[in-house]
Image: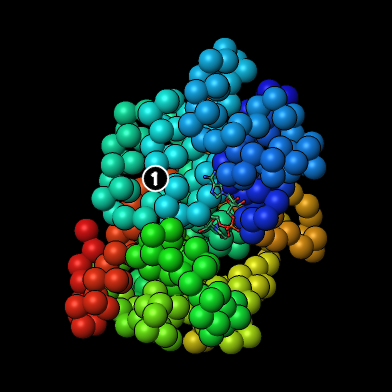
Amino acid sequence: MAKKIRLGIIGGGGDSLIGVLHRVASHINDNYQIVGGVFNPVFEMNMEFAKEIDVPTNRIYKDFDTLIEEELKLPKEERMQVCSVLTPNFLHFPMAKKLLDNGFHVICEKPMTTTLEEAKILLEAHKKAGTVFAVTHTYTGYPMVRQMREMIKEGALGSIHKVDARYYQGWINTIIHDKEKRSSVWRLDPKKAGISSCMGDIGVHAFNLIEYTTGLQVKSLLCDFNYLYEDNQMDVDGTVLIRMGDHVKGVIRGSQVATGEENGLAIRIYGEKAAFVWEQERPNFLYKLSDTEPTQIYKPGHGYNSKLSLDGTKLPPGHPEGIFDSMANIYLGAARAIRGEDYNDGEFPTMLDGVRGLNFIEATVQSNKEGNVWVNME
Ligand SMILES: NC(=O)c1ccc[n+]([C@@H]2O[C@H](COP(=O)([O-])OP(=O)(O)OC[C@H]3O[C@@H](n4cnc5c(N)ncnc54)[C@H](O)[C@@H]3O)[C@@H](O)[C@H]2O)c1
């Protein structure tokens, strides 16, 4: 058994949403050991949390800069090899940049940065560093999402003509209608979240899922945002028309005020021969629709699935695996890359996906701002 990869975690404290997903995912395939980090900007909370989850406190640092400084003093064979950046969005860029500049591998939450300009600077830093950079578009790790990608690549749908991705949540309803709350949540603060709430937080996942599964790129888009109060004009809802080719068109529908919706990410891809339908809340069922044959349901773990899909399941068919396993698959791909082993480029989203994400977010904001006009992506 190869030695475990030494992982540091920045953000993702006991008070966070995403920390537990990364911690559990990093352990699932036995590849990583969490050796330290900065879980929280308040040192006492940071230490308390480290004790709670049994991470040795000698490498829990008071802040990110101290982490870099102290880790660099350690011999290479003890030093953190990779750091996961799980902080609010505005901290991703400075932290990821400094990690790359100092030779660390990085696993970074989305959106990768808050501007396209920062994303491009990071891309240059990444080229210089030559280390591994994974962006956690979690949903690409699901076996049935991987199966869609592989079957589309092999021509199962024929030429694609329509794509419909939606990501509907309702949780901001509990915040947006309260003046005090809507002014204190970081996701609704452009200084901390970046220029978009709905598209930056969830629309970008739907966009990534489209490009990941179809292998096509969005070339231009037209966007219409909605916000509910004049004193907070961050988009909490939006509809985006997309063009991926002369006759390949579609729509991305995002909402954080879709009342009663939970984590409703879903994609429909229609081609000349067949269509795929997949929903995140029922991730183990991939529907293949046809005009001439009965609907087929693909499920994880069966021998009929692709190598990439099967690599993402650990138990025989019928043992449901979910979001923790999906994130674990991204960590597994990153581990292979860090160890210099062979891996499939569908195993984890990279820096290039991060740059595309920022290009998408900025294009939606520009389109909406200029009066719902078509905007070309780079
Ligand atoms: N991949 C996904 O599906 C997914 C899902 C949810 C969130 N996210 C992303 O994860 C990131 C975090 O989101 P969240 O919902 O967990 O946020 P959160 O507000 O719940 O948690 C943020 C954590 O970062 C810590 N933190 C803040 N400033 C820090 C600093 N200077 N140093 C160290 N720690 C610091 C906070 O103490 C907290 O523990 C965001 O970028 C978000 O977009 C991704």
Mark 1, ligand 1, within 8 Å: the answer is no
Q: Tell me if 142 is positioned left or right of 248 in this view.
A: right
SS class of the residue under badge 1? helix
**Residue at 57 percent of width and 15 percent of height:** 74
Q: Quadrant of residue 341?
A: top right
Q: Residues within 10 Å of mark 1 (few under 14, many from 20)?
A: many
Quadrant in which the C terminus is drawn: bottom left
Q: Nearer the viewer, residue 50 or 378?
A: 50
- Above/below status of 224 relative to 31: below
**Residue at 20 percent of width and 67 percent of height:** 376
Q: Tell me if 254 is positioned left or right of 361 in this view.
A: right
The residue that disc 1 covers is 93
Pinpoint residue 123: horizontal percent, then vertical percent: 32, 41
| Residue 159 visible | yes
| Residue 311 visible | no
Pinpoint residue 325: horizontal percent, then vertical percent: 68, 53
